[in-house]
Each structure stands twice: as structure tokens, then as C-alpha cells.
Amino acid sequence: MEFSFHRPAAPGAGRKILLIMRLTAILLLTGCLHVAASGHSQTVSLSVSGAPLEKVCEDIEAQTGYYFVYTKHKNDKSYAVSVHLNNVPLSEALRKVFDGLPFTYQLFDKVVVVTSTGQDQPDNTATDILKDTLEVKGRVINLQAEPLVNASVTSLKTKKSVQTNAKGQYSIMGLAPDDELIISYVGYKTQKIKIAGRSDISAVLEVSNDELDKAVVQAYGTTSQRFTTGNIGVVTAEDIRKQPVTNPLLALEGRVAGLVITPQTGYESGPIKVEIRGRNGVNPLFTSDPLYIIDGVPLTILDVGGVHMSAYSSNAISAGIDQTHISFIGGQSPLASINPADIESIEVLKDADATAIYGSRGAAGVILITTKKGKAGKSRFDLDVSQGLSYITRYWDMLNTPQYLQMRREAFKNDGITPSAAAGTGFAPDLYIWDTTRYTNWQKYLFGNAGKWTNVQGAYSGGTAQTTYRLAAGYGRTTDISTFHGANQKASLAVNLNTTNVNQRFKTAFTANFTYTDYNMNNITGVATLAPNAPAIYDSTGNFNYAQWDASSTNFPFTSMGWTYESKTNFLTSNLSLSYNILKGLIARASFGYNLSMNSQVQLQPISSQDPHAATKPTGRALFGTNQLHNWIIEPQLEYTSFIGRGALDVLGGATVQANSTVAQTVTGGGYTDDVLLRSISNALTITAINNSGMYKYAGIFARINYRLDNKYILNLNGRRDGSSRFGPGKQFGDFGSVGAAWIMSEEGWMKKVLPKAISFVKLRGSYGITGSDAVGDYQYLSQWGNNSSPQISSYDGYSALVALIEDNPNFHWQVNKKLEGALDLSFLEDHINLEAAYYRNRCNNQLIGFPTPSFTGFSSVTANSPANVQNLGWEFQLSARIIEKKNFSWSTNFDLSLNRNKLLGYPHIDQSPYYNTLKIGQSLDNIYLLKYTGINPANGHYSYYDRNHDDTIIVNDNIPRGTGNDDRFVPVNLNPKFSGGWGHQFTYKRVMLSAFFTFRKQTGNNALGYTAGTLGNTSVWQFQHRWQSPGQEALAPRLTTKPGYSDGLFSSSTGNWSDASFIRLQTLNLSYTVSDKWARKAGMSRMAFMLSAQNIFIITSYKGIDPEVPTFGGMPPARTITAGLSCSF
Amino acid sequence: MSTQYKIFTTLVIVWMAVAASGCKKLVEVPAPNTSITLSEVFTSNAHANSAMAGLYSKMMSNSGSLTFSNGAISIYAGLSSDELLNFSGTTNLMDYQFYTNQLTSANGPVASYLWTPAYSVVYGANACIEGLTAAAPDALDDSIRNELTGEAKFIRAFCYFYLTNLFGDVPIVLSTDFNKTSLLAKSPQADVYKQIISDLKDAQSLLPKDFSVGKGERIRANYWAATALLARVYLYQKDWADAEAQASAVIGNSLFSLPTLANAFLKNSSESILQFQENATVLPYNTTWEAYEFVPTFRYTTYDPITQASLINPFLFPSYAAFLVAPYCLTNSFMTNFETGDKRRSTWTDSTATPSTAPYNSVPYYFAFKYTLKVSTLNGAITQYYTVLRLAEQYLIRAEARAQQGTNLTGAASDLNAVRTRAGLANTSASTSTDLLTAVAHERQVELFAEWGHRWLDLKRTGQASSVLSALSYKKPWSDNWLLYPIPVLDITDDPNLIQNTGY
């Protein structure tokens, strides 16, 4: 007996009738029935007389796109069908077709399962005698009628398990007629089917939507929260879709416990700091970026141009695609080239068990991005259109001109300096040269624009059981509040194609995503604090007002606003994966991935932007940057799954070879005498060029063994050997591994008895592993002499110059990260509420760092291993609950919370290390030590501080450990958030859905009070109003002064400058309305929805400043974005 | 066997063949294509010369800004002494700290223009010396090996001379291996001088006595550069006899003579013992940093009287000041040092008049004008080179050494007169040792002003700094701690053995 779709039967004789698979009512999924209801509108026209059933089924399939699943028998042709149908609904057609035949049928979504009515059951008398020798065969498919390969079928009584073959078929022997089969497949709802004496049992499994059984992408495969032994956080397409962001990383903010996302600039393409489970390195010079894998292809960027150091971040951040460092925002996030609308899910792998198979590349965690795939079924076209606005929510409260002038005069008076128009000590252009009646609200002028958002996404998808496809295209255009000219645009194309051959053994999957981005940026940073009467930007002729600024010997601060910066990127990521089912349970796979990023940047500094009065006659300057990244990866794998004893065994072995290259080139043209020709390099008087390039190769072999006994005990072992080109000869290879285990306690019989009914699932899991890391940059073991520093070293005496570029060190080797995790998963009320509590402890020793060396050694850092041992320890809680599930109303919520503490466990010879003065053993790396601020001295209006050592002076001495000797900084302040997380709610009422997502953080931050007012430049009203004015006065802000002194300089090193920066932000609010099917159909659509989304709606905080995420006074505040969209499917 | 299976097995076999070719090869990458390794640098004369070019070039440029060996010492040591003031006043707090001698350990220019680039050049010199020593015997011509070693040693000595004079005791870094150097403590100044003298003597023995290496241009250190610097070092060490001997050797050589004041700083002038070559493709193009910073955009004195009158209109002057006044001006007190008739005042300085009203009161802004080209052009013609060592200083060194020894006072006077004569002044009236020393100190002030921080270093080495500078109102409150610059705070942090200078 064979199972198949409608394929013709092999010729030959056999029994007269056949049995088709039989499904009892029990295995029907009630959920499916009403889903399928929408299919009843399909109509059939058919006129046959005496046609074989199979032929009829084929015809109906062709007309409706439905699939028939039935057990074929050699003689089923003898069931002749005669019907005459004309535009008859499918349900009726089926009824007529099967009328009089010994079959019944049932409809599951798009699948028609045909079963025998029983008249033709074989004689089962024999089986009554041999009660436990019954053999059951059948097939396991999904709602798209795709066979589920390696699904497990387990007998409840004998605990014997088998798995399905490439066609989804199974056969299990030795069963008793009253046994039950448990049929399960990762990502699908498990079914329990009573055998009831039958020998043919097939099952249609439904994709699971509950948190426990949903498919979760893991390294080289899928798993579910129920069975995983590792820690994997998931963000779905639905979560991403609700947020008007263009970089998918931003959609992760607050959504995965243990993952901290911190954008570094307000600009769309700017670099984003991503940290999973805290800071591991004592040295901030290396990035903490996790490994990004997009459809199986790592997106590796070599920082050949150096990393970006942000003032507000303790760690370096990769400059990403901008390895030429032409952009003024420190880089371009490579993920900005991914279209969020093409993403199906993002998985964040955190612990050793989940990441070990990626080896050293995954030491800082892994972020897996899976793009959308086609699904079998009728072709559909989805169209999403949205438009929106972004605008500033708050301004800094600054002085107006009269207040400002009063402030300045008082400052000079306090200093005993006579302000004057002449250069020197009392030089005060704002009082004497500038127009004192002028007032400009610089913030409004610079940040007051409204940004615009337009986004159009279209996708065409569908397929059959053998071929599925998805073709998508998207276009987005945004401007932000700082945009004076230009816009950011992104266009993308995505292709996904999956094929399965006739015998179901050979499968291919191809994905390619192409994105073109064009970013235009205007540099207006750092000008919000200009004096309110400062001269205008433009003069009466519309040119830059250099004359007035120069006249006051003050630097013209807007030069860069006259510049143009454009960055265009073509980004392609593609993957072809082939798999062949060699034998039952044995699958060979090979995956070939390639990604490519071609970026070109232009920065133009026209003559018109420069000082026409400068000593050197201004000439134009143009910088042309190109960046190319190539990554290729080949991964052959062999996977064997089988049942050994009562457990399921899954063995995966494979190898990875990957090569990455990054090439960055900057060509600078100088001496242009005409702005019109700035884009033409051949018109430059001088041309200099710099190129940086790096190559990185990585190879590894790995194995994973997963054994699952009785669905209760799971053991997962990973082992691998890694080689990396980043180490010198003899130090290239390292061995690493992990062990993970899980115990599903709720499956234990004794547990079931004692467990309260409300608790439906209890799992304990844990893992321990050792991973290496080679995140040190390339060629650091090699001495390098060249001439590609920027700007270039010129030739001398007719010889081109060669200089040493790095301090080389041939001796460093793999860094070791040890990760330990334990977790408890609980589900309540039939899995309606899921709670996961995880504890982890990561220890990172032998750290590979950019070891800071004093600059007198020639360089300020060298790559080396350092004995510092850093521990990150934390708790993560993740809760999801479907609180109300009514027909018309539902409410679900999810909540995540993470707490991370890091500690410098040990550091032999720390007194000889560069960190002796700043780090303390046993304390957090994120600690800073501060003076204790004791308020404004009423006698003189200066800041005052607590004199720790009572030596009558307040000393900040960076040369000795904090808080020792004469150093008075003894108050530790931890800059790491105490806890952070997110809380989302989703309500649906009939066709309306409302979701809200809050993010929160408990932390201490730099407040915006850290300066002394009185110098040239505007100050806050608060500072002005609370200033000290006369001896004896109790004040909150210091006296005004034009020459801040020692005590003023110390303020930023005191507790006064740091305060609570905790916040709760309503990050995303989303309201959507889906119109009724009836109306949608009238409009020619199968689905239509309207959507309103808003980002950054409000913030609750006691922070002293404009926003806890904008720690500099006068910095650009975060904007609010509101978009409205329409989403339809055809 | 199905087609797919064949496809699949073929791919696997191909891959395995690749893998079998060697695991190591899979993780081997070719050398970076933008650089060569240190050992490769010293495998050919051309590469080795390029490494030396890199050293000189680094001394001339610092990512498009000032550096210790190009402008920064003249400017900052000038501000620290009594020669210069910064026009930006308190607007530029970092500069103002030098002007008032109230530096903080976080002062930017100290780290980025003085300490760090000097030590970066020291690293390059050490690397060249190590590379040249380790190079295979037949890799380089012996003459090249000697020349380059000599130049590297000269450059190292030159860097240490300024490091120890600005910072006092400093770490002596003689290796490129950070394992050996990163925890160094400061060495006493005496040891630094020992190292300088040893390097300069080595340089003398290795370098040619002509300008053949620079193909006739005076842009690469030769025997005479080493000798001239050695003369200065001995003078600073109060080793008068050796100072006299070294200076005499230079003065006695026919390669050098004193041209007119206007020609002294021309490229390859007969006075120059060592000049650094400019490169008109990098900032500040065909001028020196000193002209760029010392000379105003528009020279007031070049205008006709009517224009001049309008420029100093009290209402308009503030608007013009930025173009008429240089970023770093000579102090008015300095200008009083010129004797009547001193041509250096008219040739090497110029001024901008000011309105008669307060706060200007007609007090002019003077500026140094040794380097004349303020407005530079990319790829423009270069007329002057940046002069590092020149003959007039050697005369003054010998005059001082002779006056100190007291054995050849006439010789001292005639050395002094050689310099005075060129300046259009009569012979000195000083004849006693004390008077001659006073005269030499004065002559050094007016001859070497706004050049290489001579005034600051002279005040310090002669013990005058405290009394002269503490008297200036704008340098109060004075402390002798301010005679040494602070060691950049990052280095102190990175090296626990490095102790900050007193007072910072």
C-alpha cells in the first residue's frame, strides 16, 4: 500500500478496495473546521461520467487549489464517479462526488482528507487474537498537505516510537487495538489518536500558536520552547510590523530579556549598540556585537577602519558598513540594509547550549534573522502602505536674549573682569559685537522640522506542496526632524523559492534579499546651545554669514550644514540550501550562502560652506568612500534521527568554512575651485587615496547530539573545533563544547499526581559550555607598515612614506568564555500562561582586548590576552499570558525583565595593569567612583564636595586607585541598568486590535546639570533661576562665571552630575482595524486592515534633563513618529 | 540513482576535496594588501628609505594639525614664556592655560601636539634602528644602513631633547616591544641627556658631512645637524668646553654662513643646518604652521594710509580684528626688547594698529614674521622651509660657552657681534663674563624669538623662569611646578609606574 497525492497508481492488480486513511472524529481539530469555512465559497464545475475517483479529485484540485489526501489502492479506479456540476460550491461538489462511495471526507483548511466509511475494513478477527501485534501505518501532513518529515509517532502503551519518512509516512508495529498514538512535530500541535482497532491512521497537524509549541528557529534547525535545552528569545514578524522603524534591531528594544539595544544617534542609519547579557570585556575597545545570521549566512564586518567610540557608551561599536569613516555619526548599521517587512522572525540565542554550535563566532550571543517564506496554497498578494510624521516632543528650556545678556554680565561681574570688544581675557562678542536685540530659538530652528515617513510593501506568495514562492518588493522614504535637504530611501526585493521533488527526498530552498538604501544626512549636531543673540546662519544674500561670525572672532558653527553627505548601499544576502533524504532518518544538507554589500559615500564640502575670509583661499573638498563586504559560507551537514529505545535521537554533524573580506577605500579630492564640479574627482587639484582591507577566514567542524527520552528527559551535547585566521601561526585552533539538559517534570506520573491542576507544564533545564572568541580584528598578530592612516603621511625627500600602523603582538590566543545557565519553565491553565525564569552566569577569562598601552610606547593599544576574569550574572524573566480569550474579545500580555550584574572576579597583577586605577576586584566593571557632592557653597557660590580624607583639599587624582591616597572619589555609582525590560499588551475586540508596548529601565545616568553657566553659550532657565548670587545664599546652581575653575571642573566627577535616569516609555502604540471579509471581498480583497502606529508616545521619568537617553545638554531629543497605514491581501 | 542524488554527492565530494586540501589552509589569509611587515621593510634600500621618509614626514604632519616638531613647540612654549599671547583669550581655554601657565593634566594640546607625537616618532626611530640592525647583511647597502641608522638616532635624540625639556624626567623608550616598555617609569633627566648624547655621537660617526643624502637639499640630518644639536645639548648640560667645541665645528665649516635677515629662512639657505621639507599637498600647504598661526590674513602695514585709517575705525575694528590680528601675537612687553635700529624688528616682526579708543588705546598687535607666507595654496610654490637648526644659534651657543668659561671673552663678543652685525646693530659693549652672559641672553631673546620655544627653555635652564614669569600679572598665582608640563593623564592611567609631575 502506498500513500500519495493524486498521482496515478502504479499499474498492477490488487485488492479491490482500498482503504483510505481513516480519521476519527477525535483527531479532527475543531479549530480547523471553521477556518476551512472560508473555502466553501469555492465553486466547482465538473461533468464526468464513470470517471475514476482519482481523476475527479485531480480535477477538483485543479479548480480549487485544494488537496486530496487519501490512501491509494491499486483498484480504486473501479470506483467510478458520475457527476454534473456547474459552479457548485466545493462542499456541495464533494458531497455529490462521494455520494454512494464507501468513503467519507473531511475538510481541513485546504486539505480534503478522504477516509473509508468502514464497509471495506479488512477482517480484523485475527487482530483480536493477536492483541498486541497490530501494525498501524499512516501519514503525517500539515494543513498545506506538506508531509512532515521525521515527525514522531509514539505508542502511549508500549512507548515505542517511530518517525515518518520523507513522504511523511510511518509504520509502527506491535500495538494493541486499544492503544493510543501520540503524533508530534516541532512547531505543531501534538495529537493523540486512539487506534480503536484501525490499521491506517493519518494525521493532519496544525501549526501551534501557543508559546510552548511554536516553532523556534535554532542553530541549524528548529525547536520549540517545550523541548529546547537552551535559551532562545523570539521576536516575530507581527511584533516588528507594529513598529514604524527602518532598522530591525530597533524593533528588538525591550522585547527580549537580556538583550540591550541602544541606538547611538537620532539618525536612521546610525550605529546601534547591541549587548547580550552584559559587558564581558574589561577593555571597551572591542565591540560586544553578537553574531548576526541572516537566513544562515553570517553578516560579518571587519572593522578595518577602526571602531566607533561613543561618548555615551562604555563599549566600542562597530562602524558597520562605513569603514571609511566619512559619515559624521560614527558609522552605518549593517542591519539598516535589511527590510523589516521581509523578516519572519528574529531569534536571540543567549546561553552556551543555544550558541555553542556557532562556536567562537557566537561568543557574544547570536541573532538569527529568518526572512519570510512562501506558503503552499492559493497565491496571494499582500500590500501594505503607510505614511506618517515625526516631530520633536520637547525642547530644552533655555534663556531668551535679555536673560542671556543679564547672565553674561553677571558672570563677568562675578569674575571681576570687564567685558570688552577687544581680544583677551574679557572678550565678549555677544555683549559688544553681536546685535543684543536679536533672538533666535536655535533648537526650534534646527530641530523644529517635521520628518516624513512613507512606506510601501508588496508581496506575492503561494505555491503547491512541491513548490512555494514568495516575491516581495518594498520602498520606504523618510526624513527626520533634522533634515534640511535630502531624504533617506530604501528599496528592496526579496525572493524565496522552495522546491521538493516528486519522491519528496530532494529539497531546495533559495532566498535572496536585495536592498538599496540611500541615506542623506545633515550635520547639525552641537549648535543648540548657541547664544540666543548669535549672528544668523545666513546673510541677506542667502550665503553663510561668515562675515559676522568672523568679525567676532568666533568659530562659525554651521559649516558642516553646508555639506552634503550621501551613503548609498546595495546589499544582497542569498542562500541556497539543498537537502537529500538518503535513508530514513538520514538527511544530508548543504548550504551555500553569500552576502555582499557595496556602499558608496560622498561627502562634499563646497566652497560656499567655507569662510571666504580665511587665510587660505577656500577651495572645495570632496570625499568619496567605497566599502565592499563579501561573505561566503559553505556548510555541509549530515543529520540522523532515529529512535533508540524509548528516546528520540538526533545527531547532527557538519562543517563550516567561511571567508569574509572587507575593503574600504577613500578618495579625497582637494583644491576644487568650483562647487559645480565637486562630484568629479578629475576636477580636484589634489587627490589622495587611502584603502583599508581585511580578510577573515574561519573553519570549524561540529557535532550536536540530542537525545529525548519519553519526552521527559532531554540531553543536548555540542562539540566543535574552530580555526580562525585572526591568530598567529600555531595558535589558530581551539576546541569548545557545551552540554544542555532538560527535564519536563510535568510528564512524570508522580508529578502529575501532586501537581495542582492549574499548572500544566513544568520544565527544568540547564546548560554549561565553553566557547572561544576571536573578536579582535584581523592581522593584529602581524607587524604592519604602510601609509593608509588618515590623512595620509606625505612623501619626503622624494620617497613615499612608510610608517608603522599597529603595535603587533604574535602571542595572543583564543579567549575563553564559560557560560552556565539554569532555568525553570512553567505553564499554567492549559498553557495559557507561560513563565520562564532563567539564571545565568558567564565568565570570561583570558580576555582578548585592545590592551591600552601608554602612548609613549608608540601606540595607545595593543591586542593581547589579559588575565582579567569577568563575571556576568543575571536573572531573566519572560512571561506571556492569554488572559482573556473570548469570541469577541481577547487580551494577551507579555512581560520581560532582566537583571544583570557584572563583576571583576579576579585580575592577577592588576596593580601592573592599565586598569589599576579605574577597576576594583570584586566590583562591577560599570562602576565609576565619584566625589560626594555637598551642594553649593553659600559663601562663594562654588560647588562643594565632601573631603573624604580630611586633607582640606578636594583632589581628583587619576594616577592612583579611586578613593585612595589624596583622591576623594569614593562613592561608587553603577552605570549598568539595575533592571530593564518591556511590557506589552494586546487587546482585540471583534475586528479592532490595540497593542501597546512599554519599555522600562532602572538606571543611573548623567544628568544635564553638569556645567557651569556664564561662558559664551546659552544655558538652561533652571540653571539661571537657581544660581547663587550673593554670599550666604543657599542656591542649587553655582554662581555664573566666564572662567570655570577647578571646583566647577570637578562637578562632572561628583555625585551631583549623576542622578536617577530610570524611565518607563510607551515605546509603541498600535491600533488596527480589519474590515469584515464581506466588505473586503467587495473591494476585491481577501483581507483589508487599517493601522495606526506610533513610536515614543510618552515617557515617565524623574530625570533632570530632556530625556534620559539624551545625556548632553542641548542634544537632539528623540522624535515621536506616528504613521497610518493600510494593509490588504488579494 | 536520481539526478538530485548525483548533484548532491558531487557537491559533497567537491567540498570534501577542498576540505582535504588542508584544514590550516582554510584559516590562512593572505597578508594585508595595504601594508608590509617590519621585516619586509628592511629588505630593500627603497623600502628602508621610505621608512625614513615616514619618520620625517610624521615630524611634519599630525593628521593635518600642529605637531611638536612643526609649530606646536614654538606656539605653546612661546605662550608659556613671555613671548606670545593668544588672541582668542579665554575663548580657547586650552591655549589660555598655556598663556597663564595654569595647565591641567587634561590639557589637550599637551597630549595631542607634544607628548604623543614625539613618542610616536621615537617608536618609528626605534623600529628603524631595530630593523636596520636586524636586516640581512646583503639586504641593504652599507652606506644606506649607516646613513639611515644615523638619521634615526639623530631623530630619537631630537625627540628626547624636547621631551625632557618640556616634561622633565621622562621614560626612555628604546624598543618597539611593548612588553618591555609599557610599564617603564620615568628616568632622571640626567639619564635622558646621557642617551641623547650617546645617540648624537653615534649619529656623528654614521652620517656624512655633506648634504648628499638629501641630494643637496638641507632636509635630512647629517653630521652637522648632529653636531649642532650636540652643541646645544652640552650647553644645556653646562658642559661649556664641549659646547664650544661642537659649535666651533659647525661655525668653522664653509657650508654655513649668515645670509641677510630676509633670506635666513629661505629653503636651503646658507644659514640652515637642518630644515624640514614642506609638502604643499598637505595642510598648511606651501607655508609653515608658524606663518599660518603667527601672521594675520591681512597685513595692516601693507595698506595705504586712507585704508589704514578706516581699518582702525573704532566701530569697524572689532569686525576686522579677526583678519588683521594673528591668532598668536607677540606680547607688547616682548617688543620692548629690541634695541633701536635692530633690523630684526622691522624684518622679522610686523604689527597691526588699533583704534585710539578703549579698550585698544592705539596699542598695536605685533606678530612674528620670520615665515612670511600666511595665505597658502594647495600645491603652491614653496619658498621657505621649516628651519630646525641654524647657524645664528651656534654663534650664540659658542658665545655663551666662551663667556661661561671666561677664557676667551673676545671670542664670545665676536660671536655675539656676528649675529648683531647681521641685525644692523653695533658691536656689543659687554666685555666682562657677566655682562657678556646678560648680552647673550638678551641676544638669544631677540634672535630666536617665536622659534622652537627657545625663550621658554632658556629661562628654565638659566634659572630665570621663576623670577621673570612670576612677575607677570597674567601668570599669577605662580608656582615653580608650572615649569614642567603635565604628563598626559591617559598615560598615567595606563602605566601605574609613571608618576605625574608635581603639582598636577
Image (cartoon, coloured by chain):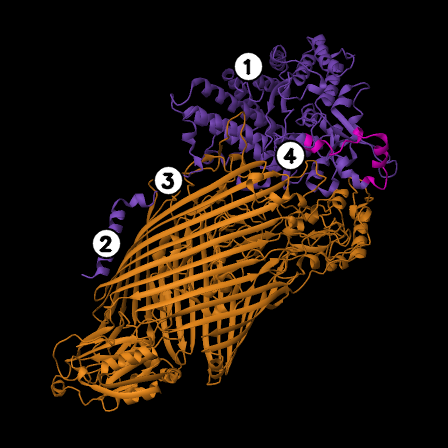
Chain colours: A orange, B purple
Disc with the residue nearer the chain's start (4 vs 3): 3
Disc with the residue nearer the chain's start (1 vs 4): 1
Callout 3 crowding tier (Cα within 10 Å): few <14, some 14–19, many ≥20: few
Callout 4 crowding tier (Cα within 10 Å): few <14, some 14–19, many ≥20: many
**Residue A84 seen in render:** yes
Horizontal and vertical percent for residue B354? 83, 35
Q: Over which residues does the magenta segment extend?
A: B291-317
**Residue A915 seen in render:** no
Disc with the residue nearer the chain's start (4 vs 2): 2
Q: Is residue A579 above or below residue A281?
A: below
Disc with the residue nearer the chain's start (2 vs 1): 2
Q: Are marks 1 and 3 on the same chain?
A: yes
Residue that carries the numbered disc 4 in the rendered image: B485
Residue that carries the numbered disc 2 in the rendered image: B10
Mark number displayed over residue B210: 1
Determine the CA span between mark 2 and mark 1.
71 Å
| Amino acid type shown at disc 3 | Pro
| Amino acid type shown at disc 2 | Thr
Secondary structure category for the residue under label 4: loop
**Which of the chains bears the disc numbered 2?**
B
Q: Residue at x 48, y 47 (%)?
A: A627
